Amino acid sequence: RRGLGLGGSSNSEAGFVYRLTPRQRKQLVGLLKFAGPATEVRADRVPETVTPTDVDVAFAPTFLAEVIAKGSMVTVHFRDVIPPDLVLLMPIPARAGDAGYWFLFQADPLNESPPDTITLDLKSCQKCDDRLQILSTDPSGQQIQPHVFVEVRWQGHSATFPVRFDDKAQLPLLLVGRKPTEGELIEYFLFGTEPDDGDEGTGLPGDGTKRPKPDAPIDTSRILAYFIRHFVWAIPGIEAEIHRAGYSRASLDAVLRGPTSPLELAELAFASLNRPPTHNAPQKTPTAVGFQLTEILAALIRAKDDIPDPELKACFDPVISRCREVLNTLIAQQGELQVQGFRLYQVKILGDAQ
């Protein structure tokens, strides 16, 4: 476009104009802060330059050949003599905050013949914090998922080393930014509201989202009956989301296991029983969580029955198996779910599939 030339001769400008959503604008603001202050480029002067600072040489763990993950099993191959103080850690994937590390390996300086290969199961692996203090084991039955890298510490150095996944179908599905809350996932399936990338989840829809008017001029976000009612309304959205992705294995697998998936909703519902209530999530009861897990499992079974392709049906098997495992763990832990009334409800909803 041609400039107006209010302060002198007009100039010409060329470029692109982008219309950004509020979510994209937040990402752009962070990028501009990283880029630094704007610099004007003029034809009559040389742009200011900054001499780059010296970059410290990074130390690489050349003594590692490869780290392989298959399911919960991790195998480490060494290519050279390992340092006597070597420590291998794997960060534990967490929805929020720091969940610590799996303590994979610590070299024994007195061992004159260190191993060439080590293999271990993350299910029985000890957990530790950043200072290598052993943490207590979480009995919640959370799904074991290897991270995409290990942290290597030796001789005062620290580096990361990538993990190779032999079974590509078990690659971790990563989310840029934080993971959505349970309330946000319900909003996603109910209204199609994309979870925000902010630091704190509110569970509320973004700008411009049309929502039904509240039933009463009171805050219902911490009332369990209202929360469960919204969950029930979101169940058709879960099945519709799966139906839309039923054209390829990759898309279906992402919808079933991704950050906005019924499996993630089931995991969050199960974990919510041991978490304090928040501003948008009420205190849960075992019966409420058992109801949620049963309904999610039933929705997955119905969606699987609607898929004619046998290859695509196979995508449901690990997800349904995990949901059933979480539900059975909950029932075993909570006595009020072992009564006849809840069993009859399961028979009614799940039938022979329970």
Image (cartoon, rainbow, N blue to C red):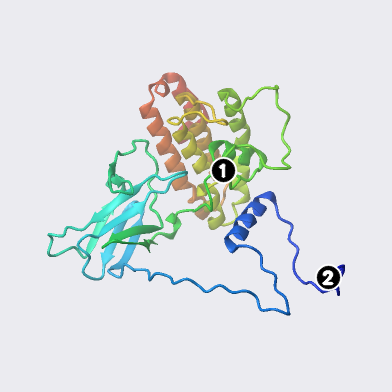
Numbered tag placed on residue 245 in the rendering? none
Residue type beneath disc 1: Ala
Q: Quadrant of the N terminus?
A: bottom right
Q: Is residue 142 above or below residue 77?
A: above
**Residue located at (28% from left, 61% from top):** 156
Name the mark nearer the viewer: 2 or 1. 2
Q: Taking 68 as reference, is 212 above or below it? A: above
User: Badge 2 is on which residue?
Assistant: 1
Neighbor class of circle 1 (other Cα within 10 Å; few <14, some 14-19, many 20+) is: some
> Picture coordinates of residue 22 (x, y %)?
68, 49
Residue 354 in view: no
- Position of 285 relative to 33 (above/below): above
* Vertical order, 43 against 165 (above or below): below
Q: Is residue 143 visible?
A: yes
Q: Secondary structure at mark 2?
A: loop
Q: As shown in the figure, which amino acid type bears the numbered disc 2?
A: Arg
Q: Nearer the viewer, residue 335 or 66?
A: 66
User: Viewed as shown, does residue 159 lie left or right of 169?
Assistant: left
Per the model, the C-alpha gap separating discs 2 and 1 is 53 Å
User: Which residue position is annotated with label 1?
Assistant: 303
Alpha-carbon neighbours of circle 2 within 10 Å: few (<14), some, or many (≥20)?
A: few
Relative to 92, 193 lies left or right? right
User: Residue 202 location in percent, x, y?
Assistant: 59, 37
Which label's residue is closer to the chain start, 2 or 1?
2
* Residue 66 in the image, given as x and y percentages of width and height: 32, 66
Left or right relative to 94: residue 191: right
In terms of image quadrants, where is residue 83?
A: bottom left
- Residue occupying image coordinates x 49% and y 32%: 294
